Image: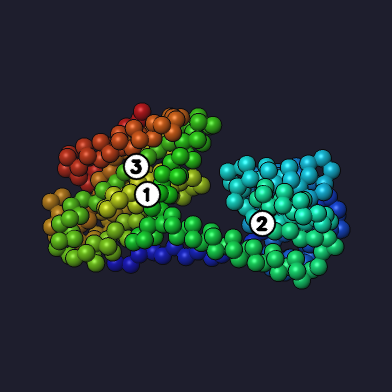
Amino acid sequence: MNVAAFPVTPPVATVLVVDDDRLNRVALAELLQPDCRVLMARDGASGLEILSREAVSLVLLDVSMPGMDGYDVLRAIRAAEDTSNLPVIFITGMSDAADEERGLLLGAADFVHKPIRPAIVRARVMAHLRLARQRNELEALASLDGLTGIANRRSFDEAMERAIRQTMRTGDVLGIALFDVDHFKQYNDHYGHGAGDEALRDVAARLHGFARRGGDLAARYGGEEFVLLLPGCANLEEVMDTFRQNISDARIPHERSATSNWLTVSGGGVVLPAMSPAQSREALALADQLLYRAKAAGRNRVLVERA
């Protein structure tokens, strides 16, 4: 049984340069462009607008700018959920230790003093990009299930919270689907735990293919249970049944199944309107009840309700 791998090619890092001096912006861009994708903003407001729509790895931020200075911009960066951990290097002509202390207390990662020395700037930027990449890799590993390679329960809980906040803003629906591999204990007992692990990886890889849009998530919920989170999905029953049929059509032999000669799954799903984070447990409990009913009704089937 071959399982699709999920290779990740590290993207080119994007660096945002925020400086009101055009010559400084251009000089920094020319210095970094051989190694990075460089975006430029001439003031703090423009820089924050870019951060709201671009995936930026590091910010080079001038301290002294008219209107919104570097300290104000850094406060806004730290206050936003998506950029709260974004490394920011201050560019400053100040030499006062108190100014540097202020920046570090606000969360600046480093300081570059004017006039800039190209080799030093490049070395510091590359060092902080390496640190950011290592941190992101560690966070990614912590969010994945070690056996199957898809998201783990912790990732699902975090994604569920984000999806709920999104439905509260947009008024859209949220689809949640729980799946259980039918008669999995008998599969393990007959074929061995190695084959059981391989079967779970196969199911996970196929489920991952149904999380196609931004915000969608396929995760291992625990043991032989999986969950699919689909914000804005109005046709959840169709999606779930297509996945159920996909597993059945894979023809993974299961001689000890009381349901089929092949490995199958059962599912319970709910389509919910906008709800509060406090209601997430109730939503999952309802999906679990529907999964239980699908199994009690003979397995290899899905049941969906709209709340």
Q: Secondary structure at mark 1?
A: helix
Up-down: is 221 above or below 115?
A: above
Image position of 269 (left or right of 196) = right
Q: Foreground residue, 192 or 137? A: 137
Q: State which mark lies toward you, 2 or 3.
A: 2
Q: Foreground residue, 245 or 212? A: 212
The disc label shown at residue 177, or none: 3
Q: Which residue does the image show at 27% across and 53% down from the upper left?
A: 223
Q: Which residue does the image show at 43% across and 54% down from the upper left?
A: 143
Q: Which percent across, then down, holds residue 155?
A: 43, 49
Q: Which residue does the image show at 12% across and 51% down from the upper left?
A: 258
Residue designated by label 1:
153
Q: Which residue does the image show at 40% across and 38% down from the upper left?
A: 175
Q: State which mark lies toward you, 2 or 1.
A: 2
Q: Foreground residue, 132 or 188? A: 132
The disc label shown at residue 109, or none: 2
Up-down: is 85 above or below 11?
A: above
Q: Secondary structure at mark 3?
A: strand
Contact? badges 2 and 1 (CB < 8 Å): no
Q: Which percent across, then down, holds residue 15?
A: 69, 58
Q: Residue furthest bottom?
A: 119
Q: CA distance from mark 2 to mark 1?
A: 32 Å
Q: Which percent across, then down, holds residue 142?
A: 44, 57
Q: CA distance from mark 2 to mark 3?
A: 41 Å
- In the rendered view of the protein, which quadrant contains the C terminus? top left
Q: Residues within 10 Å of mark 2 (few under 14, many from 20)?
A: some
Image coloring type: rainbow
Which comes before the other along the chain, label 2 or label 3?
2
